[in-house]
Amino acid sequence: MGFKWLYRTKFHSDGSINRHKARLVAQGFSQIPGIDYSHTFSPVVKASTVRIVLSLAVINGWNLHQLDVDNAFLHGHLNECVYMEQPPGFTNPKFPNHVCRLNKALYGLKQASRAWFHRLSTFLINNDFTCSRADTSLFVFKRDSCVMYLLVYVDDLILTGNDTHVLKAFITRLNREFAIKDLGKLNYFLGLEVTYTDNGLTLNQSKYAKDILERAQMLDAKPVPTPLAANVSFTSSGEPYSDPTRYRSIVGALQYLTITRPDISYAVNQVSQFLHAPTVLHFQEVKRILRYIKGTMNFGLNFSKPTHSSLIGYSDADWARCVETRRSTYGYSIFLGGNLVSWSAKKQPTISRSSCESEYRAMANTAAEIIWITHLLQELHALPPDRPTIMCDNRSALFLTQNPISHKRAKHIDLDYHFIRELVTSGKLHTKFIPTKLQVADIFTKSLPRSQFEFFRNLLHLGPPSSRLKGNIKVPSL
């Protein structure tokens, strides 16, 4: 295969130039499956896992270290025979027409990321780390009272733990095996900016949000208080938008912004459903989302040290929200010790015959996410002693989770949704009623008026780094 030199400018979180990079990249697009590569998949850490680890670090008062691996992919070993042309300046004068056989991975190869992750994970496991089964990009070290967490996202690493001396010793050992750059305290990670406050930290993407506005040429747009107008409906009819590629590019960028901005999750989910054939009206809604971001560019998730460490989920559904398919929109938000760690806003895959059914399905999806989080927390040795709770504002759906006798009303619902009954019956999960006016998951199921939207946004602990979120507002748990 051939090669190419790539040149790139790396920036700091404030937009200033960090360094200029030159890299020799193999032309992996010419590789043939089954001959010079087989598997290519390499796991990357989930956004929910990052938020959970950050929340635990704040709760326990641990330091967060950021590590960077220099030329990470070059550390991976190849199991396949891969040949590449000799690059200029490194040509062997005795054999100018020969090619190179690669013993180690090179950037651009199909299997480069997988080879690097295998090399790193092997080293960590040999050093008494355990690979999490809930998230394979999370590694946990536990010896006596010492605990360390390591998050892996390709060549970016986040390390935290309760023993400073053990952390420094491990970083030294890691640096002997790989070329590690200790960036010190975590402050900028995959476009996520970490700002430390008096009572915790704030996770935001202000630089990334500014880049989106620049790309969309809306830096000078007039801000609006909500991402969508109240009770707006989306349909596929209308005049087609002239540049669907631009539409997809902006909406795709907004999807990554939802990692720290749950307040736009519902709006982004709605505009994402028309990527195949956007209309002029759809693009106008995208521009409204951008105008909302313009006024809240420095907003982010606030993590603080709570008084309790319980796991509470809020589940909600808006029955038959889609006017064309009549499918319901559901959403959930899950808090660990009062810190928001997971949320979702999606359209249900099937039509529900009643609001009770749509709420019941939403609770089942929320329960599945909570169970995954409990498994993760158990591996992190940080599982709260209290059983998790799901808050719902539909009494009929709560009745279905607590009463296994109502077969006639639920016999048409798929069996895989009924596992929530077993969790409640066995005492592993608790369900409670919450009034609609306090149902924080409502922000993920519909567009709301400004007053309601801002109230729920505060309950999500979303605001600028210096904000105290109106001081005493807490997530309701009845």
Image (cartoon, rainbow, N blue to C red):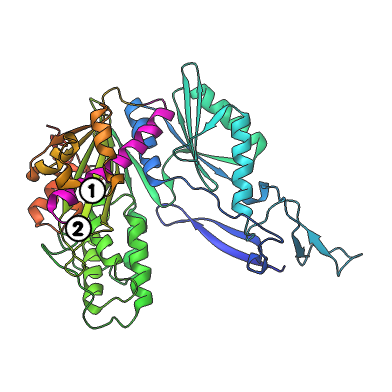
Q: Quadrant of residue 27?
A: bottom right
The range drawn in magenta is 353-382
Q: Quadrant of the N terminus?
A: bottom right
For marks 2 and 1, the one nearer the N-term is 2
> Dominant secondary structure of the magenta stretch?
helix
Q: Which residue is mark 2?
A: 328
Horizontally, residue 110 falls left or right of residue 225, namely right
Quarter of the picture holding the C terminus: top left
Query: Is residue 374 shown in magenta?
Result: yes
| In magenta stretch: residue 61 | no
Q: Residue 50: horizontal and vertical position, in percent?
A: 40, 41
**Which amino acid is tagged 2?**
Ser
User: Where 476 sits versus 448, above or below?
Assistant: above
Dividing the picture into quadrants, the one containing residue 86 is bottom right
Label 1: which secondary element: helix
In this rendering, is residue 213 above or below 380? below
Residue under the point 54% across and 44% down: 68
Q: How many numbered marks, from 0 up?
A: 2
Residue 435 coordinates in the image, percent (x, y): 7, 41
Report which quarter residue 324 is drawn in.
Answer: bottom left
Give the percent coordinates (x, y) of residue 55.
33, 34
Give the residue type that dot 1 points to: Arg
- Residue ID at (53%, 61%): 9
Label 2 to label 1, Cα distance in Å?
10 Å
Q: Which residue is mark 1?
A: 361
Circles 2 and 1, Cβ within 8 Å, touching? The answer is yes
Residue 457 seen from this side: no
Residue 83: tell me if it is visible. Answer: yes
Is residue 42 shown left or right of residue 302? right
Comparing 137 with 407, the one in front is: 407
Residue 260: image x %, image y %?
31, 49
